[in-house]
Amino acid sequence: MISFANKPGLVIYLTAGDPDLATTRDMAIAAIDAGADVIELGVPFSDPLADGPVIQRASERAVARGTRLEDVLKTCREIRDARASAGIILFSYLNPVVRFGMSAFAKAAKAAGADGVLLTDMIVEEAGEYLEAMRANDLAPVFLAAPTSPDERLKAIAENSRGFVYAISRVGITGTQTELAADAETLVKRLKQFAQVPVALGFGISTPEHVKTVAGFADAAVVGSAIVALVEKTPAADAPKAVGEFVRSLKQGGQPSS
Ligand SMILES: O=P(O)(O)OC[C@@H](O)[C@@H](O)c1c[nH]c2ccccc12
């Protein structure tokens, strides 16, 4: 279930299959137990355009190991069986989903226990068939909103998103930054005019301080590259514990001060 009732709301991105699928499952479980509200389970893709170097490398490693969409669905099911109530979003580019078949994919995602789907390069203006497949399977479609989008696009993105809407804090690619983008708060406020669902902010969020700042104006923070970089430098056997500890520091350090 997608809920951000325990502040600060936290969405944790993992590239499935890096370092391997069993470790991905265990890291997701550790992240949930440490306070992650939603896991974004990334299907590794050979041509990840929107991704910065850290996630690109993770995708390459996972693809090189032969990780396929079917395998990621299986891992999703394992995470769901282990933790009934956490939110799970399947995260992919459009191409692998189209190859799988949109309707078959939606059915399989539901059967795998996912709550929702985010397709990075799916644009809301062309989402008719996708939205229908999501609706038919009771899955939440999550769309990305960029600071460069005019109001009428933000409105369509907000109104068609379920579970939450994803605000991209800055133009460009994923990756950690020392400073949060200055116009991130403006984008969240613009989206909030239109959104009935929570607004999550991602891109460049990597520290408990960032999470705390974001919690002041958005419903949730998305952390991707900082997690994936930690996974990259940690031996597989230690990765679930390391991810759990990092997520706990984000959740606790991100708490609003009273
Ligand atoms: O890596 P960052 O800067 O922490 O941002 C989250 C991001 O990685 C995750 O949500 C994501 C992974 N791949 C993407 C592609 C497009 C948009 C978002 C994403």
Image (tube, grey):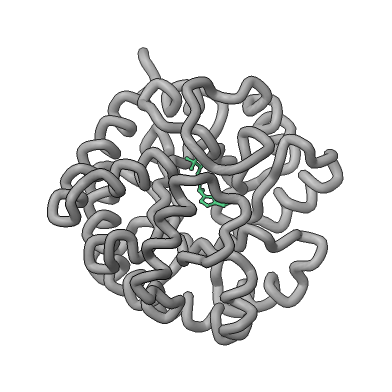
Residue at the image position 65 percent from the left and 50 percent from the top:
144
Residue 39 visible in image: no
Residue 20 visible in image: yes
Location of the N terminus by quadrant is: bottom left
Query: Would you say 129 lies left or right of 104 here?
Result: right
Location of the C terminus by quadrant is: top left
Image position of 127 with respect to 1: above or below: below
Picture quadrant where residue 150 is located: top right
**Residue 220 coordinates in the image, percent (x, y):** 48, 38
Q: Tell which of 124 and 70 is nearer to you.
A: 70
**Residue 70 coordinates in the image, percent (x, y):** 42, 81
Picture quadrant where residue 145 is located: top right
**Residue 224 coordinates in the image, percent (x, y):** 44, 44
Residue at the image position 74 percent from the left and 32 percent from the top:
190
Query: Would you say 234 lies left or right of 140 here?
Result: left
Image position of 59 with respect to 241: above or below: below
Residue at the image position 44 percent from the left and 60 percent from the top:
59
Q: Tell which of 63 and 116 is nearer to you.
A: 63
Query: As drawn, which residue projects farthest toward the top?
Result: 258
